[in-house]
Amino acid sequence: MAATIRVTVWNEFLHEKKHEAVRKVYPDGIHKVVAQALGGEPDIEARTATLEEPEHGLTDKVLSETDVLTWWGHMGHNLVADEIVDRVQKRVLEGMGLVVMHSGHFSKIFKRLMGTGCDLKWREAAEKERLWVVDPGHPIADGLPEYFELPHAEMYGEHFDIPAPEELVLVSWFAGGEVFRSGCCWHRGQGKVFYFRPGHETYDIYYDKTIRRVLVNGVRWAAPTGVAEVKRGHHGDPLERI
Amino acid sequence: MAATIRVTVWNEFLHEKKHEAVRKVYPDGIHKVVAQALGGEPDIEARTATLEEPEHGLTDKVLSETDVLTWWGHMGHNLVADEIVDRVQKRVLEGMGLVVMHSGHFSKIFKRLMGTGCDLKWREAAEKERLWVVDPGHPIADGLPEYFELPHAEMYGEHFDIPAPEELVLVSWFAGGEVFRSGCCWHRGQGKVFYFRPGHETYDIYYDKTIRRVLVNGVRWAAPTGVAEVKRGHHGDPLERI
Amino acid sequence: MAATIRVTVWNEFLHEKKHEAVRKVYPDGIHKVVAQALGGEPDIEARTATLEEPEHGLTDKVLSETDVLTWWGHMGHNLVADEIVDRVQKRVLEGMGLVVMHSGHFSKIFKRLMGTGCDLKWREAAEKERLWVVDPGHPIADGLPEYFELPHAEMYGEHFDIPAPEELVLVSWFAGGEVFRSGCCWHRGQGKVFYFRPGHETYDIYYDKTIRRVLVNGVRWAAPTGVAEVKRGHHGDPLERI
Amino acid sequence: MAATIRVTVWNEFLHEKKHEAVRKVYPDGIHKVVAQALGGEPDIEARTATLEEPEHGLTDKVLSETDVLTWWGHMGHNLVADEIVDRVQKRVLEGMGLVVMHSGHFSKIFKRLMGTGCDLKWREAAEKERLWVVDPGHPIADGLPEYFELPHAEMYGEHFDIPAPEELVLVSWFAGGEVFRSGCCWHRGQGKVFYFRPGHETYDIYYDKTIRRVLVNGVRWAAPTGVAEVKRGHHGDPLERI
């Protein structure tokens, strides 16, 4: 594991420019707030990238220098070029971590890596959400209380159309009567994927101390580890005499 | 669960027409042999479909009448139209079972549903393979011996670039020194996916009684079950007063 | 899989004899109601056994003729003899299914098979529970609606100290603010274990049509399948020349 | 996560005293060699404990100061007192990591935490073992080659009677024709359990650089993480108005 985790915080950065209500909460964009939260840790270095940059800011060079990519998107999923999605997928399979936040559930890259529709129920009613830790020894739960609350959240409800999480860390309770698998982990190739539900553009959720703790934990969990080199393809010489 | 499981056995049906060696083993195509194996069971009805048919034989009508689709492809993965892959994926997410055989690991539909590269090591040296049951109570292991052997098999070796199987049933030992996760299960949406390694076009593997037993078990396991209806999307009215 | 699934419905049968309130709901014991629910299916044959019978009704003969054992206990967990627990565990590892209901989470046999403390939060306040299906294609969800409700339930809350379910089918929402993993599946040896949360001695939950459907599905899922014979121990003769 | 991981290396320390052949390989006991391997890392502090010490060296004080316990036993499993097993299990459920090595598969503590028989096939024929990484991005695979070999190993073969590993990292190939799930991870309560197959008392396996790397990785993976405090039991006051 590298000493410093190099994170690229990606944001479509559309809501913040179009809606005054969002700009009030995130004047410089959600990515700036997330990057600040992550970059404040001694073992994390955070840079940002957005949709409008050339190649959406996700050039081969940037990705090759990224240990963990965090993803926030909502309105602009379809504006992300397929070639960039291909490139990000390739990097995840090679070991780059991916932390997908909230409405990123419907991003091309998340759907690509899951193989499912990734749809869910949703409702915007500023209702209470309570997130329960169901795997209390998991690294992503490190230092968390047994549950934490968001007073005003957009509801996401089951069925969430994802493959069963390989590790399920958090389950949400919503005042309106729904539940949701809110902290979910998967391995994909040599890479790791963490989906974390909270975070809406009109709520100040990414300023919340506990939410930031989960993001930091998620980044550390998703940081590259593993074998030096994976080999596949034609393997003509057997290791043993046949 | 329906009384009769309606299976569509899909085959690209290319090798058999091009190579005399394959035609000798499967004169009417691999699909005919697989369909015969499955259709011989009282609870299974099997039809076939091939690449060259209109819409590859996988029309909306055919798929809507299919409980489980089995997939054999090798040379022609790229000849399968993306629209058909979309359609099959949609049906799997809606509940249709999918049994992917051998070189189908590289088919568009399998890669789509896995979200990974699905690559592996391979070698054609007619070596011995021994498949060990590692989940002896699994329905797909029903009636099997603790291990079974293929005297002449193409080798597939790790790392097999798939998501960790939700249920791992079989692990292969190869004479040349490799191992492989050979019987793997996943849920995707309301559908179930079973990958089964054995089966090469130049070996008479699909005539083998144990192999056929696994295919039959796989089809039964993958047959649609589950909730009457899944709802997703906007869910404006909370179930409880907020 | 056998044509008929032979179920033994076990109940400690203590509450019903001691408390008038329980007797009103289950005059002949919870086991009679559960056995009636299961035995009403054409493919299931149900008998009962209780704590007070010799060997708690779980003789070698009874167990050897049992495909699936269902377990209800609450006050009398410690009255179950360790030898009987050993015997039941052995039978599960050999392939017998086990369906553990509600307060059976604290039974010796469930704790034995889980390896964890199996403790949880609880509250008796007759509050509303809503169970959401999170694996909509699972056999245990067969024919269920996307969620179902119990108007008056004892609350069980996380953290539920169990190994992560190999298949998580149901998650409960409680009016009081908690969530719970309420339908959980594991393989143990050749056997299968299903834990199902609902069912309190003072509520008429086991008369509920949907609850009964889950129990029937659970029994079918847990019915023995798998390899003819598992071998372990000294294996002096290698299968290949070393 | 603490800055330094405090490891207690436990060994029954019987073979080394009874058999000259073992003493030649491990003159001061297997524990000394393992402790040296682990303690050589800057972030790990290793002490040892053995069966013959009072309370087997596993007093409340020692366990309360242990982040990860490694376990080696073979001849003396039944000499381990049940009270000590209870105590170790309790500590694991509270968050202590446990790394079980080789013949420790049959230890009381491993069987207790697994809930299964933990039996397997075995043969002592000094045959070749090749361990393949099947989860190449896993922290326990960090820095490993895609496979590694032991020229002379005791064979362990399937079926290994354990719950399906939550994370399967290594699969062994044996010259004699068997396979084995050799690197297996589970969460139990707040604790983590890693089983690692290699290591026989008459082979110098624990001097091997790659084996030591796996042990170090296993200890780091198993080190305590997670929530500050887990609450269970009576929870009379709902978090929401019912």
Image (spheres, coloured by chain):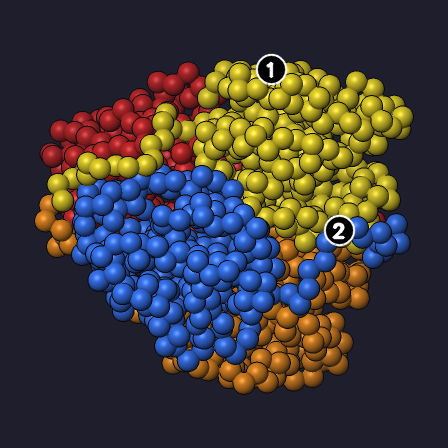
Chain colours: A orange, B red, C yellow, D blue
Label placed on residue C45: 1
Dot in front, 1 or 2: 2
Question: What distance separates the C-alpha of mark 1 from that of mark 2?
Answer: 37 Å
The N terminus of chain A, quarter of image: bottom left
Nearer-the-camera pick, C90 or A21: C90
Residue occupying image coordinates x 50% and y 15%: C3
Q: Would residue A118 appear left or right of D218 to someone viewing this image? A: right
Residue occupying image coordinates x 18% and y 27%: B27
Residue occupying image coordinates x 65% and y 18%: C54
Q: Chain of mark 2?
A: D
Nearer-the-camera pick, C99 or B9: C99
Nearer-the-camera pick, A174 or C34: C34
Tell me: residue C221, above or below residue D131. above
Going by the numbered disc 2, the residue's amino acid type is: Gly
Q: Secondary structure at mark 1?
A: strand
Residue D116: horizontal and vertical position, in percent? 48, 40
Q: Which residue is mark 2?
A: D233
Residue C188: horizontal and vertical position, in percent? 49, 38
Q: Would residue A101 appear left or right of B178 to someone viewing this image? A: right
Going by the numbered disc 1, the residue's amino acid type is: Glu
Q: Secondary structure at mark 2?
A: strand
Residue D9: horizontal and vertical position, in percent? 43, 64
Q: Chain of mark 1?
A: C
Q: Would residue D241 appear left or right of D4 to someone viewing this image? A: right
Q: Determine if residue B184 is in view.
A: yes
